Each structure stands twice: as C-alpha cells, then as structure tokens.
Amino acid sequence: MVFDWISDPSAWVGLATLIVLEIVLGIDNLVFIAILADKLPPAQRDRARLTGLSLALLIRLALLASIAWVVTLTRPLFTVMGFGFSGRDIILIVGGLFLLFKGTMELHERLEGQEKDGEKKIVHAVFWQVIVQIVVLDAIFSLDSVITAVGMVQELQVMMIAVIIAVGIMLLLSRPLMLFVSKHPTVVILCLGFLMMIGFSLIIEGFGFHIPKGYLYAAIGFSVIIEALNQLARHNKERLITPSNIRDRTADAVLGLLGGKRPQGTLGQTAELIAEHAEEKQVFSTEEKDMIQGVLTLADRSVRSIMTPRPDIDWLDLDKPEAELQHHIVEVGHSRFPVARGSLDNFIGVASARDLMRDILKDGKVDPKRSIRQPLVVHESISALKLMEQLRHSGQAVAVILDEYGEIEGMVTTTDLLEAIAGEFPDEDEEKLTIERGEDGSLTVDGWIDIRHASRLVEADLVDDTDRYSTLAGFILWQLGHLPHEGESVIDGNLLFQVVALKGRSIDKVRIRRIEGAI
C-alpha cells in the first residue's frame, strides 16, 4: 500500500533524519540565495527569496519524481585516463566551478569595496538575472540533496514529505537569515568562503576523490565559532556607545580628518558602530545632516551653483523716474538692489533700500556717490568656499559674478552662502518649493529645485561635478539637449523624470518615479 510506511518506526526515524539532512544540505543554498537577493532593490528581495526557495522545492520534487533517471546519473558515461565520469560527476564538477567562479567574483567585489562605494550611484541587479542564477544554484544543490534522499530511504512519499518540510523550515528561517547577512558584512565574507570551499569539494568529488563530510563540517564549525566571537566583541563595543557621546566622538572624527585635534583612542574600529547607532537612534536630525553635508561639500561647489542667475536678478534702472523706482523698492521688499543704467550690462553698483528711499524722499533723486557702493567682483570659476573667504575679508555682503567676457552672470549674497549650508530661507514674496508624493510612490516637484536637494529626495547622485547645471530643470535640459515638451521624459539609472508642465521656456513641474528592474 502507499501508506504502509506509516506503521513502520524505521520509516519515521528515516523521515526525521532526512529532514535534518535536507536542512543541513540546503543551508548553503539558502545562504547563496540571501547573498544574491541582497543585490536587488529592497522591495524585491523578499520576492526573490520566496521565488528562489519555491523553485528549489519544485526542482527537488521533480527530481524525486524521476528517481529512476536520477539513479542512472551515477553510472559511468565515459572514461578518461582510467577515471570513469558519470552524469552526477559532470554536474558536480560544473556546479563546483560555478560556485568557485561566483564566490570569487562576489568576494572580489566586496573586498574592492565596489558595492558600497559612496561616490558612485547605487546600482542594483536586475530581478530576472538574479532569479536565473538562483535556478542554476537550485539545480546544483538539489541534485546532491535528492541523491542523499534516495540513498537513505526507499519510500518516495517519505522523501517528498521530508523535502517539503525541510524547504518549509528554510522559508521560515530565510528572512531572518537575509536580514542578518545584510547587517553583518563579515558574515557575508565568511559565507562566501564556505561556498568556495563547498565548490572545491564538489570538484574533487566529481573527480572521484571522496572527502569525508566531517572534515568539511569541522572547518565550517570552527569558522562559525570564530565569527561568533567576533560578533560578541562587536556587541560589547555597541554597549559602550551611548547617544550622549556619539556627537562628541563624531565631532572628534571629523576634526581629525580635517587636521584638527586628534581623537582619543582608535576611532576607526568603532566608526561603523557609531554610524549605525546614530542612524537607528536618530541622534542627528535631518536638518543637522544636511548642514554637515553642506559644510563639507562647500569647497567642491562652484559659485554658479549658488548664485542668483542674471534673469532672476531684481535690479533698479536709474534712467527710470524716481516714482517708479520708489514703487519697485516697496513692491519687491529687498534690503539691497543692484543699480544700473538702461541695462544690467551698464552696472553701477549696489545700494541698500534704506539709502535709496532716503535719497528719493529727501532729495527727489538717487545720489550715486553717497548711496551706491561697489560690490566684490569675482569670476564664475571661483568656488563657494573661496568666495565666502573673500566676502569675509572685503566686508561686502554682495558679490557680482562675471564670465570670461566680463558680462554679469549672476549675484551672490551672504544669505546665498548660508542657504548653501543650511538650506533655503524663502522670502515672503518668493515662491515656495512644492513637493507632492503620489500614491504610486512618485514625486512631483518644481523644476527649479536645487539639484542637491533633489538628489537627497530620490537617494541618487544627480549632481554634475563640473556644475553645468544647478537645478533639476537644468539636469533634464542637459540630458535631453533641447527644450522638452510636456509629457517628455528622460531616464537616468532606475529613475524616470517626466516633464509635467512648462512655464514659458522653462520647466515648471517634474514627476519622478522609479523603474522596477532598471539598472
């Protein structure tokens, strides 16, 4: 009968033993699935994990259903120099070479720091490519698992039940394992070492040399003990880090990098722990992080990225009637105004609104000698940090930016420099930035949003090192090379930027969304 084995105690012992062996044999498969899934975007990792283990179950059940064919894989197909090679041997050799190659590539990528390079955009793998690799691994590991099952028990039902239970247990353990692997990079290195060792043992076994599994498990067990001690030491360091001293130790580290006071102790050993605790416990607010980033990147920013461009400059034309000047001063409400005659190219200087109003109300006209002052004049290639230093020494609050032909490109005030560090301080009459989040996860923002602000919103590096653009609209124009029409889009990495609305010849609104599966 089909279920005669239920009354056989030895069958139950075999079932329990086989379940344990299937789990042990599936751990290496599970670890590699976790490593491969970690290369995907966070939203796709659980789907890849479930897909991978489900495919592993289907492959093993399919192989079990064709036991007669699996058993024939142990029969020699051909002989080379006295060594007989069966189908199983060929699969083990090919699978071992695949594990060695894949493990070596993954290990090289992590040792070279390519995956976590902060200066590059984060690039995730494509979902279907990861699934193909998981299927290949499932086929390799499933063969070893099925042959073990065939050698242990006779009943097909017992084999299938053991495989289903083992994969079910691995499904329950897979998510905690993936989270643990993602959080502990040293464990990933250890697991890659295991997989390379397993790959080497598969090749050796494929050539007919039997290596006792006890040696392999002993080496793995010893390595696990060493890694456990490493994690214990890490945990003890975490206990010494409290929110009260994270700020001080972070400041010491930054000052040490900048050539200031040297931090006491060896900060490098605990810097990663400090960063993790600062993120988990929200020691630094978002505003503080933005300010620190603004300070540290100020030297790399050109003055073009923070200046008010020429078309946006509110200036006064002294050739116009005093009544019109007075109305413009009151209407705009700025504290200072650039002053020129006829056009901005005939620039005279900068005057405070108070002095201009005093001249108009007292004398009926503006007195250039008394009220107009010469601002700091700099070239457009100067960095924002150098400009700040020159403004400090000159005592001026305004700088005029000239191009190589001596024409005015824009203006920078001390407020612009402060905004480059601390963020925007919108005036009462200034248009406020709007950011709308859609139900599909997309963002709709103004085209004039600062490109660095936009980069933080989408968690991608959109900044141009040569400052060819400073806004999101400039980024899109640079990518397209022409003024877009409404609905036109551009793709950068896994982000799609769609022009929603135009205002004259400028981009008014842009919708940003992520493209699933894009590189």
Image (tube, helix red, strand yellow):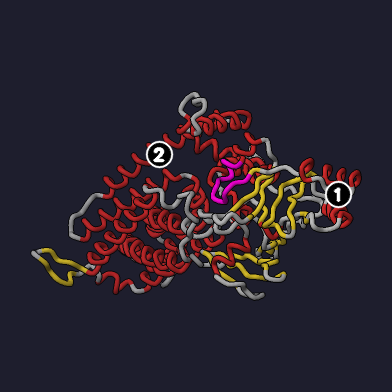
Instruction: Please provide percent x and percent y for residue 463.
Output: 55, 55
Relative horizontal placement of residue 408, taking residue 340 as reference (left or right): left
Judge whether 418 appears above or below 453 on screen.
Answer: above
Residue sitting at x 37%, y 63%: 137
User: Is 385 one of the magenta-colored residues?
Assistant: yes
Judge whether 246 appears above or below 94 on screen.
Answer: above
The answer to whether residue 296 is visible is yes
Foreground pick, 75 / 322? 322
Q: Secondary structure at mark 1?
A: loop
Instruction: Please provide percent x and percent y for residue 511.
Output: 66, 66
Residue bearing mark 1 = 365
User: Is 253 one of the magenta-colored residues?
Assistant: no
The answer to whether residue 280 is visible is no
Foreground pick, 34 / 246? 246
Q: Which residues are magenta?
A: 377-387
Judged from this view, the residue extending furthest toward the right is: 361
Residue sitting at x 64%, y 36%: 394
Judged from this view, the residue extending furthest toward the top is: 264
Compare marks 2 and 1 and give the one earlier in the sequence.
2
Q: Which mark is residue 271?
A: none
Relative horizontal placement of residue 448, taking residue 351 as reference (left or right): left
Q: Amino acid at mark 1?
A: Lys
Picture quadrant of residue 66: bottom left
Residue bearing mark 2 = 227
Q: Quadrant of the N terminus?
A: bottom left
Picture quadrant of residue 491: bottom right
Foreground pick, 9 / 431? 431
